[in-house]
Amino acid sequence: MKLYVVRHGETLENANNCLVGRINSPLTKAGIDQAKKVGEYFKDKNIDLIVSSPLDRCRQTALAISNNRIPIIYSDSLLGRDHGEFTGKHRDSINFNDYWNYNKNIQYEKAESVRDLYNRVAKLIEDLKQQYYDKNIIIVTHSGIMRVLYYYFNGIPEDGIFGEITIKNCEIFEYEI
């Protein structure tokens, strides 16, 4: 199984460096252009399925990649991290290393914990491996989900901090399963 993971194109909140999570915002003009460019990248690849977050920014990106050639299914398991009380706030307003620390796994009043997020994403990958083990799949999702997938495939760091990587809009990660 070949798995491509794509972050959605730019949104206004991304451009302003805010925690977006489950805000259902559309792509900016730049985000639409990014999604079209990623669609070109996949144009000649043998892709069987796109699995996407149902939020508009991911839908728009998935549709640009699919270009009516590749079937798309939507999964709530790919929704961005529920930032709860931090939704819409500037990224600098939180302690990023604590917020993304798997070992500390801080339980916030409303925000989804890192381990809950990790378990949700890991279950989806296990399900995809069972159902589509011989397929090439594109996942269209959010930076937090991509961060979790990176550590799912590469191992959780000893300090538990999921902060080693930054993920740009429409960046592509590839995994061989």
Image (cartoon, rainbow, N blue to C red):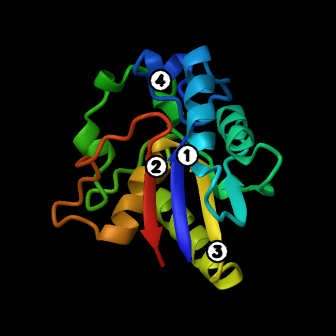
x and y percentages locating residue 74 in the rendered image? 76, 53
Q: What residue type is labelled 2?
A: Ile
Front residue of 147 and 51: 51
| Residue for point 69% across, 57% down | 51
Q: What residue type is labelled 3?
A: Leu
As helix, strand or loop, the secondary structure at mark 1 comes to helix
Report the Cα–Cα distance between label 3 and label 4.
29 Å
Residue 76: give x, y in percent of width and height.
70, 53
Distance CA(mark 3)–CA(mark 2): 18 Å
Q: Badges 1 and 3: C-beta atoms under 8 Å apart?
A: no
What residue is shown with label 1? 41
Residue 22 image offset from top left, x and y in percent: 61, 36
Q: Is mark 4 on a helix, strand or loop?
A: helix
**Which of label 1 and label 3 is nearer to you?**
1
The answer to which of marks 1 and 4 sits earlier in the sequence is 4
* Earlier sequence position, callout 3 versus callout 4: 4
Which disc, if any, is residue 172?
A: 2
Q: Is residue 115 visible in this depiction of the protein?
A: no
How far apart are the alpha carbons under marks 2 and 4? 17 Å
Residue 164: image tag: none
Q: Earlier in the sequence, mark 2 or mark 4?
A: 4
| Closer to the camera in the image, 43 or 61 | 43
Give the mark nearer the N terminus: 1 vs 3.
Answer: 1
| Mark 1 or 4: the one toward you | 1
Tag 2–tag 1 contact (CB < 8 Å):
yes
Disc 2 vs disc 1: which is toward the camera? 1
Q: Can you tell which of label 2 and label 4 is closer to the viewer?
A: 2
- What residue does disc 3 label? 128
Say which residue appears at 31% left-offset and 29% top-offset.
Answer: 94
Check if mark 3's residue and mark 4's residue have beta carbons within 8 Å.
no
